[in-house]
Image (cartoon, rainbow, N blue to C red):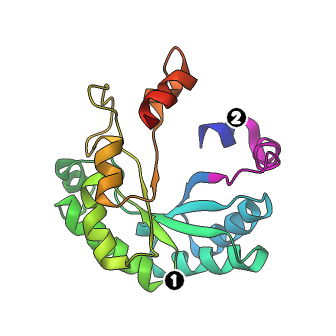
Amino acid sequence: LEFITANGPAGVREIVSLGLPVFADVKFHDIPNTVAGAAREIARLGVALFNVHASGGEAMLRAAKEAAASVDRAVQVIAVTVLTSLTDDDLQVVGQVPPAQSQVERLAKLTRDCGLDGVVCSPQEIGLVRRIGGDKFLIVTPGVRPAGADLADQRRVATPESALLSGADILVIGRPITAAADPAQAAAEVAA
């Protein structure tokens, strides 16, 4: 999201032109018509994958998937369940009934039923989501931190190895790499 905000569509097109699959972590959340328009535009940039917030509801989820497919059927659309920075107390404050695991379960089922390709969930809900969505349901997992790394604002976390062993398909590892003095070395250490 920071990259897209700073570099805009031209920046996304430039990264797409490198030939690697691009995940646009945009987390769209608005009325169905607005999200459909945004989904069409992000799909036109050539991304392989983008996300919306599952809490936008059924009509919004279906609109996002249909709009992206109208541009490119290969574009995968996934839905964010509960942000990894949120605890049960945070959910209570914003009027969502804790625990986080129950909210993730409800939103993962909704996402599956709306025909999306998968979800974003914390490492702690991977097994639950896999049972809900099956083997082909994509699980993207942020809140991944190498052992001993600063958690910063992340609350529901696990190590990369633990997240992979739990069944995550894609790990999102930001600051332990991007904020490192040598990001390439940090990435190599995480991969090792």
Seen in the picture, residue 21 relative to 77 is either above or below; the reply is above
Q: Position of residue 171 (x, y in %)?
A: 44, 49
Give yes or no for residue 117 being in the magenta stretch: no
x and y, in percent, of residue 116 in the image: 52, 76
Residue drawn at (42%, 34%) of the image = 192
Give the number of the mark in front: 2 or 1. Answer: 1
Q: Which mark is residue 162?
A: none
Crowding around mark 2 (Cα neighbors within 10 Å: few <14, some 14 to 19, many 20+) is few
Q: Nearer the viewer, residue 117 or 38?
A: 117
Residue closest to the eye, 52 or 29: 52
Q: Which class describes the residues within 10 Å of circle 1: few (<14), some (14-19), or many (20+)?
A: some
Taking depth in this image into account, of 49 and 166 the one nearest to the observer is 166
Inspect the image, locate mark 2, and give the three-letter code of the amino acid beneath it.
Answer: Ala
Q: Earlier in the sequence, mark 2 or mark 1?
A: 2
Q: Give the residue at mark 2.
A: 6
Horizontal arrangement in the rendering, residue 173 relative to residue 20 (left or right): left
Q: Is residue 16 magenta?
A: yes
The quadrant in which the N terminus is found is top right
Looking at the image, the residue that sits furthest to the front is 192
Q: Which residue is mark 1?
A: 115
Q: Is residue 20 above or below residue 7?
A: below
Image quadrant in which you'd find residue 72:
bottom right
Q: Secondary structure at mark 2?
A: helix
Residue under the image location 39 percent in, 79 percent down: 110
Q: Amino acid at mark 1?
A: Gly
Q: CA distance from mark 2 to mark 1?
A: 31 Å
Q: Quadrant of residue 176?
A: top left
What stretch of residues is rendered in magenta? 7-23
